[in-house]
Image (cartoon, helix red, strand yellow):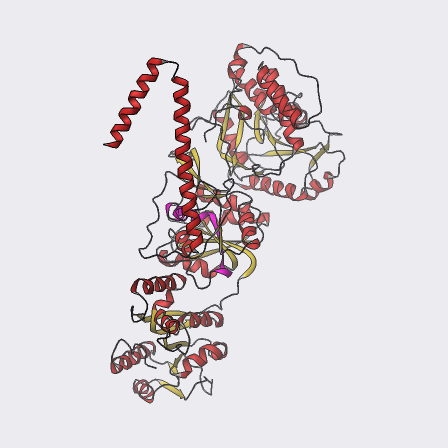
Amino acid sequence: MSGPASANGGGPGIWLGIVLYRNPERELERLWESLRWNREVPGAPAFRVVWLDNSPDDTLRARVERLDADADYRHAGGNLGFGAAHNRLMAEAFGSGGARYYVCVNPDGLLHPDCVRELAREADQRADTGLVEARLFPDEHPKPYHPATGETPWCSGCVLLVTKRLHARVGGFDERFFMYCEDVDLSWRARASGLSIRVAPAALVHHYTVTREESPVRERMVRRSAALLGAKYGDAAFMNARLREYARLGGEPFPTPDVLKPGRKLAGIADFRHHLEFARRRW
Amino acid sequence: MNALSEEASPSAATERWMEWVRSRARAGAVVSLVGASPALAEALRARGLSVRALPGPEWKRGKGPAPSLVVLEGDAVERVLEEGLEALRREAPGAELVFGLRNAGSARALMGALTGEAPVRAGLSEQRMLRRLAEAGYRVAHREVVPCASGGTALAEDTAQALRAVLAQVSPSTQVEEGLYVAVPDEPGRALVAGLLSVVVTVDPGARDAALDEALFALACQEQQPLELLLAAPEGVDLSAAEAALERYGRLGSFQARVVRASSGALYAEAVREARGRYLSFVDARCLVYPRHYVELVRALQTGREAWAVARAFRTEWASSEGTPPYVRAKVPFPLGERLEVEHLVQHPELVHAMVIDRGRIGPFAVATESGLGELPARLGALFPPVFLGGIASCEVRGPREPPAAAMAPGTWLLRPLDAWVEAVARIRDETLQAREFRHRMVDALNARVHGIPWVHSTLKTLANRLKSGNER
């Protein structure tokens, strides 16, 4: 491996965390191949890959080890959820692992060969970097970012670089979000704490969900997480609207979250005017 | 053989034929004449060439060295082209063929037969000849043709012109009355591979490496299988970065790739010739395909009867930038609406990058012409109504701004059943009426809302009347 090492004993300064849940073999093969590309390109930084499996059993261990005999595979023992699983890895990466950057990698994405290098390069640009997201490809996310600086209202968790500074300042994901909207929440907290969150336009991740088969479970999860986000940032109307949608989709009742009063800074950052986009769309 | 006989005097035609053959008979050539006139044999011998004259119509290898030039005349042309080409290619593998052909598939011959004014012209059509040559492993390297004369039928002039134009659109060779040809050995033409999609990725000299890399990355990640990518570039264009990218992405096992090189003018034709797939598509560095783009297009063709399928696309507007990836300012879907109208094919030449052609359903239609691909959707659409996928756009064409509409060649004719036209006109009329009704309803609603505010109402009414009278002037 090449590239900058950590300050802690020469291990890779970048960790890639992949949270699994019953993934098809082909999906993992493609992802692994794309990680190999990322090690081969000129100027590729060294990185370590850790797999944390949220599946009910460790069937995926064999699949992962077929791809990489030395794979760092761990079974979570149950479904921790997206944020909690990444938090577990992140804590290790920034603690005993001595990493500078932790990158959340969705297993259904395919990283362009330059992705990790460009994420790290963008993160290195500024000392106050909190988050850097890869640009979704081929159908770019319509939320805006500044063409010159890359600053964006929130970062997608699909392939997301988290800095050690961010982890130290605001912690990881809010584990009350089982899945969805935890990335928006982390982004808003990062901004409120004065950190910069940006898109790295040259870091591409192939991830296309527009024609993905509709899943009522997923739709319900999105509404539930969005309702929680609304409650956390004090927007009762937004929360109630999402809860109604959740109920219409047949979601099991759950205790209505308390509507909190965020600080002035957080309230100024949170954006609920654009439905589930959380920012105005470019198109 | 009397090629050019109807346009030139018999002696001049014969002289031109002799000249044509002599031009191919280089010093040291071993010539095999099949069914040729003694005068031609004599003329070639007089130039010191080794000549073996066969009475024809078959060609036979005989003893001695294999011929380097085989000249076909009279009945030998049809007999050898139809039945003897494979043997010729096998037994005289390096030989060129020289022959003349009176095109049995010329528009004039076809229309004469159609109206009963002329008997069906015997012999081979140029299209058939080209097909047989390709099957046996030859291609036409040179040809000199006499174009088909217009007129001469009992049909009204406009009708005759329309029929002839349509024939030309289906097959340019219908416009050839007769010709002289030189065919040279080539790779045998391959049968199209059923189910295979060939995507021609053309690389212009000005294409940005990063944009091309993204186009290839998107292609590597799409789901259609099997898939063949043909990276097509004019001679001299550096493809090293693209070839490295293809090699890397090829490890996903989702496609096979090849490079096609030719001069700019011949690039598309060469790429089409080398493409093995029954399904054919064209993209360039500006294009991004979404993962199921081709799956849906090919499925539409496999389940339908159309010759080509086209998807809705995004025009992705790039803001110019220095040293950074272009910033996407907007994405605009095109064409709009749930129906693909004929005008869309002319208005949006970029639809050429959002379509798949079923080559098994277009006959001799020339996909590639020297003028490029800009007219292809309109040319295809004129003859073959496509299936339009509609719905969400499944690919992108990126660039700074909208390109101009395709300049269609004048005299292009459109084949559609009459009821399709009647339906289209009725639909447009309905939409116009609905739009007018909607406008009236909007005005009424606005009027009702501001009615309670006398000053605003009267001002708006005055303004509306002024505008109305202004429009009427």
Task: Please state, as top left, top right, bottom left or bottom right, where the N terminus of chain B lies in the image.
Answer: bottom left
**Residue A172 seen in the current view:** no
Give the percent coordinates (x, y) of residue B350: 41, 46
Relative to B340, does residue B162 appear above or below in the rendering?
A: below
Q: Is residue B15 left or right of residue B227?
A: left
Between B34 and A90, the residue placed more toward the observer is: B34
Residue at the left extreme of this rendering: B473
Magenta span: B341-370
Looking at the image, which residue is at 42% across and 60% down?
B270
Give the percent coordinates (x, y) of residue A220: 65, 28
Looking at the image, which residue is at 39% across and 14% down?
B452
Relative to A180, does residue A239 appear above or below in the rendering?
A: above
Looking at the image, which residue is at 61% across and 16% down?
A231
Task: Please state, as top left, top right, bottom left or bottom right, where the C terminus of chain B lies in the image.
Answer: top left
Between B54 and B167, the residue placed more toward the observer is: B167
Q: Is residue B37 left or right of residue A33?
A: left
Give the percent coordinates (x, y) of residue B235: 38, 56
Relative to A64, does residue B231 appear above or below in the rendering?
A: below
Give the percent coordinates (x, y) of residue B111: 36, 70
Place residue B98 in its image quadrant: bottom left
**Residue B359 in magenta?**
yes
Q: How many marks?
A: 0
**Residue B271 seen in the current view:** yes
Looking at the image, which residue is at 34% across and 69% down?
B176
Between A260 and B106, the residue placed more toward the observer is: B106
**Residue B211 in magenta?**
no
